[in-house]
Amino acid sequence: MASPIQKLPEGRINHLQKKIMFTLFFLALYRIGVHIPIPGVDTYLLGEFFQSQGANLFGMFNMFSGGALERFSVFALGVMPYISASIISQLLTVVVPDLEMLSKEGEAGRKKITQYTRYGTVLLAVIQGYMMSATLASSEFNGGPLVMDASLLWKVMTVISLAAGTAFVMWLGEQITEKGVGNGISLIIFAGIVAGLPGVVANTYTQYTSQQMDLFRIILMTTVCVAVVAGVVFMEQGARQIPVQYAKRQVGRKIYGGQSSHLPIRVNTAGVIPPIFASSLLQFPVTIAAIKPDSFIAEFINLAFIPGGWLYNTVYVSLIVFFAFFYTSITFKADDVAENLKKHGGFVPGIRPGARTAEYLHKVLNRLTLVGGIYLSAICVFPTILTGRFNVQFYFGGTSLLIVVGVALETFRQIDAHRQSLRYDAFLKQGTIKARRGGGI
């Protein structure tokens, strides 16, 4: 007879398959929406404009939107307004006492904060949509206007379309997180980046055949990509195993505890969130520049905030390290972990339970977070500097590879965890251990 650990019931396998198919279907809906343009824009001229701007912030945001920005589709803003609203709500949760109390009220409080985040997303989408429509309405490229009829009606329609598209993308991400597999927003960014990589590979091959790029550059870029992927996989699997000993305690006639275990703390607890949040905040200089594109401030932003430049890299690294500490402090509560260990009779050998354990965990966590922030910064910045010197397209930057590999690893972890939970459920419900029948001792 087959063991329930080796073979899962058919219905349970179908349940996991349905979650995966649900995720793929919603990602396909997102990719379809990327190709639905807003009327009134010369998409051919706009595409040429973004090809000429491939190495600056416009190119990076176009990458995160999966090419929706260069097509000026209804999903042109992508998930950036949602990410910005999430950053603002999390910062306000730490600062505003009422929001902090809401966050501690369990599921009901989190739902309320999520609702505020949705409102903030729509508000930011309206603001950014107006800035984008006003900028395109007054812009020209190669002597031709980007917008065919830049009337007030077109601007209103554009703002409404972009805000509605952002709200729909936000809904897609939430549905994937709730009913699918993986983090929906991260998977949407993942899908946008992966969708653009084949075109970059084809463009690189075209440049090689036309002798615009030599074999040395291709080998160098391949080496950089492989090294980044290997480094991300190695660091994402790294964790500090803190030994935990459980004291023996007697309940009735039974003795519990006396076991040794480990508390794993990942080197990069924040995952790919810091680079995504940092990239989202870097959108604000572009938004400011869009208010008056011919001003001195706009010219300075366009010249200074170039990926690979010293000012861009300094701001980017600072934001990554900040969000690494900030997000880790939200997701890993050392005080709560120490209190739970104390309640269950657990302690770290050589460390007193309670406040001393919390201080020890804070110390270990801060060191690991610093290493994780430096690792994220190196992965995101160093390949960009290297590739910029060899005139390679921005898609091969470290940020895109980090997000792709990190999201893929996290999604596979969730799939594996889901499979393991199904196996344990099947073992408990269909195990071979039977209860005794009849009386007697």
Image: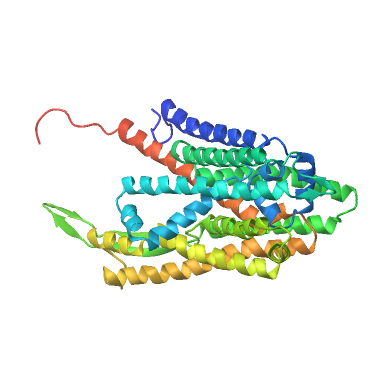
Residue ID at (60%, 38%): 161
- Counting from the top left corner in percent of width and height, residue 432 is at 31, 32
Seen from the viewer's position, the closer of residues 378 and 263 is 378
Seen from the viewer's position, the closer of residues 98 and 265 is 98
Above or below 259: residue 116: above
Above or below 428: residue 312: below
**Residue 412 visible to an observer of this rendering:** no
* Quadrant assignment, res 387: bottom right
Q: Outermost residue toward the right?
A: 211
**Residue 144 visible to an observer of this rendering:** yes
Residue ID at (55%, 63%): 320
Above or below 252: residue 296: below
Q: Outermost residue toward the top?
A: 10
Q: Outermost residue toward the front?
A: 152
- Counting from the top left corner in percent of width and height, residue 25 is at 56, 31
Q: Is residue 135 left or right of residue 262?
A: right
Q: How many marks?
A: 0
- Counting from the top left corner in percent of width and height, residue 389 is at 78, 64
Colour scheme of the picture = rainbow
Seen from the viewer's position, the closer of residues 220 and 294 is 294
- Counting from the top left corner in percent of width and height, residue 285 is at 63, 60
Seen from the viewer's position, the closer of residues 129 and 356 is 129
* Quadrant assignment, res 313: bottom right
Above or below 196: residue 361: below
Q: In which quadrant is the N terminus drawn?
A: top left
Q: In which quadrant is the C terminus drawn?
A: top left
Residue ID at (30%, 64%): 338
Q: Is residue 207 left or right of residue 105?
A: right
